[in-house]
Amino acid sequence: MSHKILSHQEIQHKIRRIAYQIYEANADEKEIVIAGVDGGGLQFAKKIGAVLKKITDASIVLCKVSMDKKNPLKSGVGTSIPEKDYAHKSVVLVDDVLNSGSTLIYGVHHFLKTPLKQLKTAVLVNRNHKKYPVKADYKGISLSTSLQEHVKVEFKPKDDTVSLG
């Protein structure tokens, strides 16, 4: 049985709020790199980027972050844009759900190998089950859930939802 936590409209509101928070933190930047973890994180990053493009004159660069979420050490972390395109820039690493923190910590580790102006993290759902010392700088909602519960984020045209099962 699945319980809806966020409706499409509520998710759109959270996307706009996060985009404005990113804009405020980067008001003087000429370019902002939005790095979405492949899958739900990349879809969420695209939605944030679309709002940012409407509210700032800064160039918004979308970057896909690829890794094997089950074994990120073995596979390593890759990006769809070369390192020189995000070096000395403001980067926001985006994922849909922050569970244990392993995906974000490996993503953060990857970006910290390059000199950056700033590195922040954004998630739609923060589950508060972190194994690693990583936090979401921007978050849509924080949930205290049991480890047995599963948070499902679905991005569909005009029907984005977050549910707990």
Image (spheres, grey):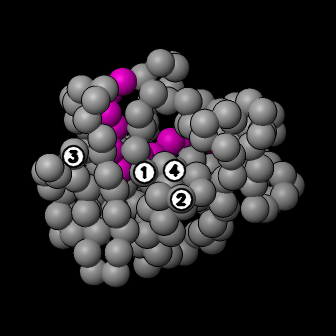
State which quadrant residue 61 falls in: bottom right
- Left or right: where does residue 54 sit relative to residue 66? left
- In the image, is residue 122 above or below residue 32? above
Q: Nearer the viewer, residue 109 or 137?
A: 109
Residue that numbered label 2 is attached to:
39
Farthest front residue? 1
Report x, y in % for residue 102.
Answer: 55, 30
Residue that numbered label 1 is attached to:
96
- Left or right: where does residue 88 sit relative to residue 133? right
Disc 1 secondary structure class: strand
Please name the amino acid that badge 1 sits on: Asp
* Badge 2 density bin: few <14, some 14–19, many ≥20, Cα 10 Å: few
Q: Which mark is residue 164?
A: 3
Q: Nearer the viewer, residue 34 or 103?
A: 103
Report whether residue 1 is seen.
yes
Looking at the image, is mark 2 or mark 4 earlier in the sequence? 2
**Mark 1 or mark 2: which is in front?**
2
Cα distance in 3D space between marks 1 and 2 = 8 Å
Residue that numbered label 4 is attached to:
94
- Residues at discs 1 and 2 in contact (Cβ within 8 Å): yes
**Mark 1 or mark 4: which is in front?**
1
